[in-house]
Image (cartoon, helix red, strand yellow):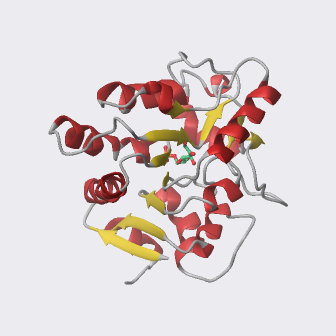
Amino acid sequence: MKVIVTDNFEASCRIAAEQIASVIRSKPDARLGLATGSTAQGVYPYLVAANRAGELDFSRVSTINLDEYVGLAPDHPQSYRRFMDEHLFDRINIDKANTIVAKGTGDIEANVKSFREALAAKPIDVQLLGIGVDGHVGFNEPGEVLYDGAHVEELDESTIDANARFFATRSEVPTKAISMGMGDILRAKKLILLATGESKAAAMRGLLLNEELDVQNPATLVKTHPDATVIIDCALAEKIGYQE
Ligand code: F6R
């Protein structure tokens, strides 16, 4: 696992975007695995800017997202489909028919099945990851077991608390999500995990400061990936006592 410590979150996002751009340049029909949330949100403006400057072409790129809330329609303001449209897809020259976000309404079992089929159809060339305060990646929450494939996950109370900032009240936050499994994530050819902020310190200690693989901190499984890059800013590195 490669670890990059940057001066600040902006620099982390720029480096993550450069790495994604370099995958696209070497493989113009790359499949990107994408994430939502405030960490991933920092990366997308760099991809949009490169596209608008004519330096990065998304016309043959396809994407698949880590997760979607159960119960939110694609046009709901807090759905992950809407997040992706607003922050990336509507701003670049991608064919939206080539962008997959699991559907969180209707027949959920059928939606999980078609999400699984979509995952099996083409390998992910690079997967962008944030990390939850409890160590979740995608929405693979800590627990007795972790799952290989896509499934419906019950969100932890700490995840609901963290995501409540995006909703008018905590009770509006969905309690379940469709998520790629840990296996799906680890099958991506390249992983880029980005983290910032004190709230991620405990989970990041588990990822960076020991050799344990811990089902209570799913992000620790990223250690097993042959091409994983973790990008943190120096404030977080200092907070957890990580030294290069
Ligand atoms: C989002 C996702 C989550 C987030 C994580 C961190 O698609 O899969 O794992 O990456 O919850 O969220 P932020 O970046 O908002 O702290």
Relative to 229, residue 51 above or below: above
Q: Pick the residue in front: 62 or 86.
A: 62
Please name the residue shown 39% across and 65% down the image.
231
Residue 199 at what x, y percent from top left?
A: 51, 56
Q: Is residue 211 left or right of residue 147?
A: left
* Quarter the C terminus occupies: bottom left
Please name the residue shown 63% across and 28% down the image.
170
Residue 58 at what x, y percent from top left?
A: 33, 38
Q: In this view, does 9 lie to the left or right of 208?
A: left
Residue 135 visible in the snapshot? no
* Count of numbered marks: 0
Relative to 56, residue 135 above or below: below
Q: Pick the residue in front: 75 or 187.
A: 187
Please name the residue shown 47% across and 73% down the image.
240
Q: In this view, does 152 lie to the left or right of 35?
A: right
Looking at the image, the residue that sits furthest to the right is: 144
Residue 53 visible in the snapshot? yes
Residue 158 at what x, y percent from top left?
A: 65, 46
Q: Pick the residue in front: 125 or 212.
A: 125
Please name the residue shown 37% across and 31% down the image.
94
Residue 214 at what x, y percent from top left?
A: 72, 71
Quadrant of the rendered structure where residue 162 is? top right
Q: Pick the residue in front: 48 or 219.
A: 48
